[in-house]
Image (cartoon, rainbow, N blue to C red):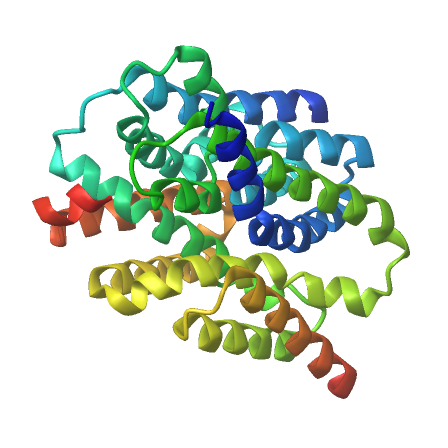
Amino acid sequence: MHSIYSYIIVMAVVTYLIRMLPLTLIRREIKSNFIKSFLYYVPYATLAAMTFPAILHASDDMRASVCGFAVALALSFRKKSLLTVAVCACIAVFVVELIVI
Amino acid sequence: MGDKKEFRRGLADAIPVCLGYIAVSFAFGIQASEAGLSVFQAALMSISNVTSAGQFSSLDVIKNNASYAEMMLLQFVVNIRYMLMSTALSQKLAPEEKTISRCLVAYGVTDEIFGLSVTRKGRLHPAYSYGLIICSVFGWVLGTFMGAFAGNIMPQRLISALGLAIYGMFLAIIIPEASDNRAVMGVVIGAMALSCMFTYAPVLCGISSGFRIIIVTVVIACLAAVIAPRSEEETADA
């Protein structure tokens, strides 16, 4: 059994170094267009992979999750704020679960 | 002596971020306590990491009792975007800014704080960043604490609904850019499809969720960088 505190320390160190090293070391712009492009696409690939299909299993009922997903998508396409999208997705799940369960 | 003014401005600008963080970290607190973390451990993780995607994904690793190496690799890949943000911010700070200021600013590089810092006109004042960071991290830790502490006594229906919060936030981060940029849309759809394959296909579904995210990210972002490299003007804006 690994210690939770060790996990937290490992995470914190890796995450901090990622943030700290470029700020302290890199003072000139990155030249490689491939690396710049890769880094640009990374967050979208990561967050998309984390979201789907996990979002389908995020609530107790898959039908409710699908509705929450649809609501979040629709609001995101309208460029609503993070808070609005998150709260409305939760409300959608809550309402659907009230009806179907 | 513009420091005080910049600091106050940072505090005020970060209020919406603070509120958003409370909602999302509340959900994190609940999931963390379900994964077996104590209230203190959950709050400690939040104050030492300040990364939504990294922290949520870490819970799977902890639940599965996976290796520290897997945790390091997962955090590296999930958070590698901060490298780009820190690089952009390093250009925005005055070149003579002290190393200690740079180290403190680095602590608070998140999607939202970066967004606020980088869209400010002119040089980035560290005092402004400190204001943003203190206000935002306060919300992040408070929400975690409340979620981990009170999540256990919350009705199951509410917990179930809050499970969607983090994914809603992720979609709100990626979809606006995807709807303006076809390459990003391709990345989002491709990553979701590949992630589905790794979740449900035989053999592939045996791969842990941490490595699934790593593999999908590296494959899709590499493909996108080869097929649709960013032009010089586009990368100059980043």
| Residue B208 in sight here | no
- Indicate whether B238 appears above or below A24: below
The C terminus of chain B lies in quadrant: top left
Q: Picture coordinates of residue B123 (x, y %)?
A: 31, 32
Position of B84 compared to A14: left or right? left
Outermost residue, front side: B1
Out of B3 and A31, give the one closest to the viewer: B3
Position of A45 compared to B203: left or right? left
- Taking the spot 44% from the left edge, 70% from the top edge, the residue there is A76
Out of B156 and B11, give the one closest to the viewer: B11
- Taking the spot 28% from the left edge, 51% from the top edge, the residue there is B220
| Residue B74 in sight here | yes
Total residue callouts: 0
Q: Picture coordinates of residue B161 (x, y %)?
A: 71, 68
Quarter location, residue A79: bottom left
Quarter location, residue A22: top left
Outermost residue, left side: B232
- Indicate whether A35 appears above or below A8: below
Q: Picture coordinates of residue B72 (x, y %)?
A: 49, 26
- Taking the spot 36% from the left edge, 32% from the top edge, the residue there is B124
Outermost residue, bottom side: A99
- Indicate whether B228 appears above or below A42: below
Outermost residue, right side: B153
Q: Picture coordinates of residue B78 (x, y %)?
A: 44, 40
